[in-house]
Amino acid sequence: MQDYVVTLLGGLMTTLELTLCSLLLGIVLATAMTWVLERQLPVATQLVQLWVLIFTGTPLLIQIFLIYYGPGQFEWLKQSPLWVLLKQPWFCAVLALGLNTAAYSTRLFKGALDTIPAGEVEACRALGFSPQQTLWLKARHAARRLVPAYSNEVILVLKGSSLASTITIMDVMGLAQGLNAQTYDTLGVFGVAGAIYLTLNGLLTIGFRWCERRALAFQA
């Protein structure tokens, strides 16, 4: 059992890097899409809504497969400079996870902005704030309320990163599958893998609970 732990911990850094990169990509995209929705830009708003619908309405595993295996079906893509990236499992995994969490995060970000009392917005307008300044103040206040919901999204991305093993990424789950194929000790191998993910999620939960108390202290 100890050997299992040592072996699977070898994929821990890959799991963490995959999760972090996906979250960063998701935050950048979600911020941009939330801005589009908040400003109600024509055409762009409909495109964002379609994006969110597609990526929240289909399984993450299918998205990973389409992004990794799909481009290889088009010869023009294989001949393009993009193929250098699209043929890399790591890039495709981060892209799929990032696009997926961006869609869910957009819903969270927009929902948090919508919870800002209308009185605060009217006060900003009365003080002569520009639309950009008003949106910035709304975003600052919304960020405090966003912590509890976004903590769940972070945990979901961490768990979802295990699906990257289906396209040869050697994270914790990828190593677990290889170890299981060698030992046939399914209960032991995946039990240890599950314990690693449980520990990571537990630490994240503790950290976010602390952040939540700090962020929502103004409501006390």
Image: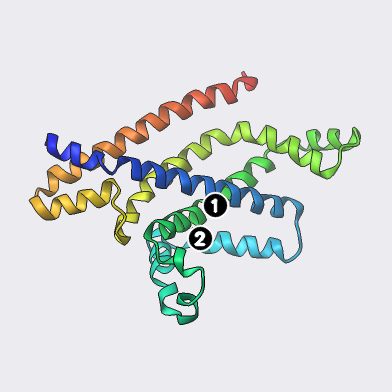
Q: Measuring 58% from the left and 45% from the top, which residue is drawn there?
A: 108
Say which of marks 1 and 2 sits in front. 1
Q: Secondary structure at mark 1?
A: helix
Looking at the image, residue 65 sits to the left or right of residue 81; the answer is: left
Q: State the scheme by which the image is colored.
A: rainbow
Above or below for 79 versus 64: below
Looking at the image, residue 211 sits to the left or right of residue 47; the answer is: left
Residue that carries the numbered disc 2 in the rendered image: 55
Sooner in the amino-acid sequence: mark 1 or mark 2: 2
Q: Measuring 47% from the left and 43% from the top, which residue is drawn there?
A: 153
Specify the amino acid type for callout 2: Phe
Disc 1 and disc 2: Cα gap in Å? 9 Å
Q: Quadrant of residue 50?
A: bottom right
Residue that carries the numbered disc 1 in the rendered image: 102
Above or below for 207 versus 187: above
Specify the amino acid type for callout 1: Ala
Residue 88 or 109: which is nearer the viewer?
A: 88
Residue 97: image x %, image y %? 45, 54
Quadrant of the rendering where the C terminus is positioned? top right
Q: Quadrant of residue 189?
A: top left
**Residue that protrudes farthest toward the top in the picture:** 220
Residue 162: image x %, image y %? 33, 50
Q: Secondary structure at mark 2?
A: helix
Looking at the image, residue 14 sits to the left or right of residue 214; the answer is: left
Mark 2 residue crowding within 10 angstroms, few (<14) / some (14–19) / many (20+): some
Residue 201: image x %, image y %? 36, 35
- The answer to whether mark 1 and mark 2 are in CB contact below 8 A is yes
Looking at the image, residue 40 sits to the left or right of residue 186; the answer is: right
